[in-house]
Image (cartoon, helix red, strand yellow):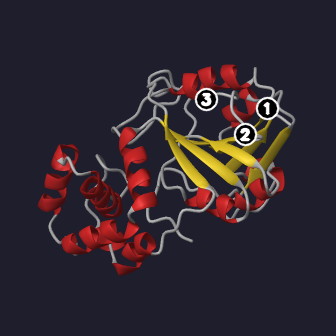
Amino acid sequence: MKSPIKDLRFQPKSLRSLKELIPRKSNVDTYLLYSGELEINLAEEERYLVSHTNSYVVYDFWRALFHSPEIITQMVEHFWPIEDDKLFEVYQKRFRTYTDHLMRAALFFILNRCSSEGMIQSGLFDRSNFNPLAVSYIKRFKKINFDVVWDKNENFEETVTEDTDADYIYLPVGKFSYNFFEDGMSRGFEETRVHHTKLHERLKTFNKKVIVDYIYHPQVVKLYNTWPTKIFLNEYGQIVDQKMAKEVLIANY
């Protein structure tokens, strides 16, 4: 099953390696939910996921999709096609003024699909990904072993916890920044700020099994240098030497 949402910031290719690190029947807490593509794939193969987000609009979309995919599909079809970038900008500005949560979910999908970056508040107008095939992903969506939680605290690192029933914790963090001015920044209300050093300080105290997933950067490997498992992946998800890596999975076990 395909996710209806795209995310061009980080598209993990780590699914095959994750399936080896996280056995079937496991309870898994994931964080930084957005597109849900990887979460759906794990859940379809008998892993039980609770996916966390600090963004209410992301939570709002997934909650609506879980319960009313047919209605959202009808609303989306009413808007299709969008030919005008000015109309796209109007929807961006008015998105949060809609009081009906299903209408917000429909617009979330439309803006995501019409943004060159897959973001609601950023990116240039690009209608190529808003097409009948993408709409069909909403219509065919079925909730399987996958729940979503909204963590209301804006300080993301404080919301990551091992005080749950999860056997594993997975964080697809994406881009790493060692620039003081970029660390912790976000561009829109759908994004979550991540302070990488604070996150590491918190995670290193955990007793549960934790996996972080980053776009490769040597400073990530240095930051997590005491963690025993590091899997370097190329753009196809194949395990490679560090010097060829595009992505890195790091686990504390």
Residue at 51%, 26% (x, y): give it: 179
Instruction: Specify the amino acid type for callout 3.
Output: Val
Please state if 29 lies on the left or on the right of 118 as rendered. Answer: right
Q: Mark 3 falls on what kind of element?
A: loop
The location of residue 237, given as percent across then percent down, is: 71, 61
| Above or below 7: residue 75 | below
| Front tag of 2 and 3 | 2
Percent of width and height locating residue 210: 75, 36
Q: What's the mark number on residue 166?
A: 2
Residue occupying the point 41% across, 38% down: 55
Say which mark, if any, is on residue 117.
Answer: none
> How far apart are labels 2 and 1 at the CA level?
8 Å
Amino acid on which the number 2 mark rests in the picture: Ala
**Dot 2 or dot 1, earlier in sequence:** 2
Q: Please say if 128 is above or below 39.
A: below
Could you tell me residue 56's position as x and y percent? Answer: 38, 39
What is the CA distance from the residue labelled 2 to the residue labelled 3? Answer: 12 Å
Give the residue pinned by disc 3: 160
Residue 4, by quadrant, is bottom left
Is residue 12 at least partly visible in the picture? yes
Please name the residue that numbered disc 1 is placed on: 208
Please say if the residues under marks 2 and 1 sit with CB atoms less than 8 Å apart: yes
How far apart in space, not on screen, are marks 3 and 1 (Cα)? 12 Å
Work out which residue is located at the far bottom of the displayed protein and give it: 132
